[in-house]
């Protein structure tokens, strides 16, 4: 009986050891997969960092009115004082918008005014969208550099159809967003890769249309808003344009409140 008990004990111990080895191997394998996933797919910031959540919707009926507008000043030739830069530096404090971002929004307005004068797009509307989408290029702790690019790429959450998120399959092979499974919005103005491909713009004239570069992104956003002869200076046209960017009433009301306040602040400054 004693010898039988010893053999049984040894067999039980051996079986337990093998089970532990298998369990540890499985845990290690899962850990490797988790590490690889983090290394390959860009991670989204915590929910509290989403800029839109920090903005209240304005109590305005969609389509009833357009926000106030104030034209950006025309830049001057090289060698003289650039009023656009001076304007941006003067308004940066009162509006809370980085001067570099203001220059991009103002330049985009001027460029759209030159190519599509009937659109009547205001820099303030672009600024409202830029605040909602990336806090003017500062999403997730990024800083907007002098070259117009954030200190780290701005990449949105996976558009995988999870609650509150639209499902959009991969359209760029991960070229813009680093995700080859589904699309993610990219850059300060949060363009979906397929949309950026259509509206690619090179506002800083470096030969490259870069959605992470705020001059390029703001000009592309302006062109997108003004598509099909839209008049962004009218109530109907303004709301239609913003809804084409994001078809959400709270989104439109937030952009309206921001744009209207930016324009009013600029008028007072």
Image (tube, rainbow, N blue to C red):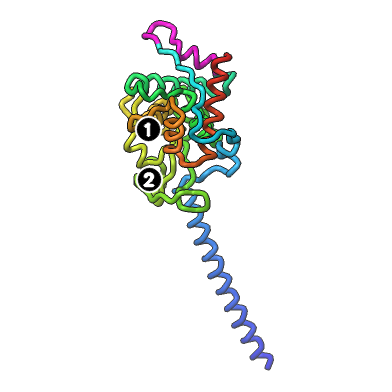
The residue to which callout 1 is attached is 224
The front one of 90 and 46 is: 90
Classify residue 254 as left or right of residue 79.
right
> In the image, what residue occupies the spot 41% across and 5% down?
80
**Residue 249 x, y percent position in the rendering:** 52, 40
Residue 88 is one of the magenta-drawn residues: yes
Look at the image and tell me whether residue 138 can be seen: no
Q: In this view, does 48 lie above or below 225?
A: below
Q: Where does the N terminus fall, quadrant-wise?
A: bottom right
> In the image, what residue occupies the spot 56% across and 30% down?
257
Residue placed furthest toward the top? 80
Query: CA–CA distance between discs 1 and 2?
Result: 23 Å
User: What range of the chain is rendered magenta?
Assistant: 76-91
The residue to which callout 2 is attached is 174
**Residue 243 x, y percent position in the rendering:** 45, 38
Q: Where does the C terminus fall, quadrant-wise?
A: top right
Element assignment for label 1 = helix
Element assignment for label 2 = loop
> In the image, what residue occupies the spot 53% across and 23% down?
98
Mark 1: give few (<14), some (14-19) or many (20+) Cα within 10 Å. many
| Marking on residue 122 | none
**Residue 68 x, y percent position in the rendering:** 51, 22
Look at the image and tell me whether residue 71 can be seen: yes
């Amino acid at each position: 009986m004693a010898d039988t008990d010893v053999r049984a004990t040894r067999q039980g111990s051996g079986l337990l050891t093998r089970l532990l080895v298998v369990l540890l191997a499985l845990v290690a394998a899962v850990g490797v997969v988790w590490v690889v996933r983090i290394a390959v797919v860009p991670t989204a910031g915590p929910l509290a960092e989403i800029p839109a959540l920090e903005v209240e919707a304005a109590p305005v009926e969609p389509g009833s009115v357009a926000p106030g507008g104030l034209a950006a000043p025309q830049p001057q030739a090289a060698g003289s004082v650039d009023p656009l830069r001076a304007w941006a530096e003067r308004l940066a404090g009162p509006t809370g918008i980085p001067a570099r971002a203001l220059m991009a929004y103002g330049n985009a307005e001027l460029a759209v005014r030159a190519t599509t004068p009937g659109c009547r797009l205001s820099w303030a509307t672009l600024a409202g969208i830029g605040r909602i989408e990336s806090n003017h290029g500062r999403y997730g702790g990024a800083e907007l550099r002098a070259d117009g690019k954030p200190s780290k790429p701005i990449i949105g959450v996976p558009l995988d159809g999870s609650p509150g998120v639209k499902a959009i399959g991969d359209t760029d092979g991960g070229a813009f967003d680093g995700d080859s499974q589904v699309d993610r919005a990219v850059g300060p103005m949060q363009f979906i890769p397929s949309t950026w491909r259509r509206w690619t713009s090179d506002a800083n004239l470096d030969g490259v249309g870069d959605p992470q570069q705020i001059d390029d992104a703001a000009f592309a956003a302006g062109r997108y808003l003004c598509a099909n002869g839209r008049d962004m200076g009218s109530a109907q046209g303004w709301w239609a344009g913003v809804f084409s960017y994001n078809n959400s009433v709270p989104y439109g009301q937030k952009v309206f409140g921001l744009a209207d306040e930016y324009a009013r602040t600029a008028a007072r400054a």
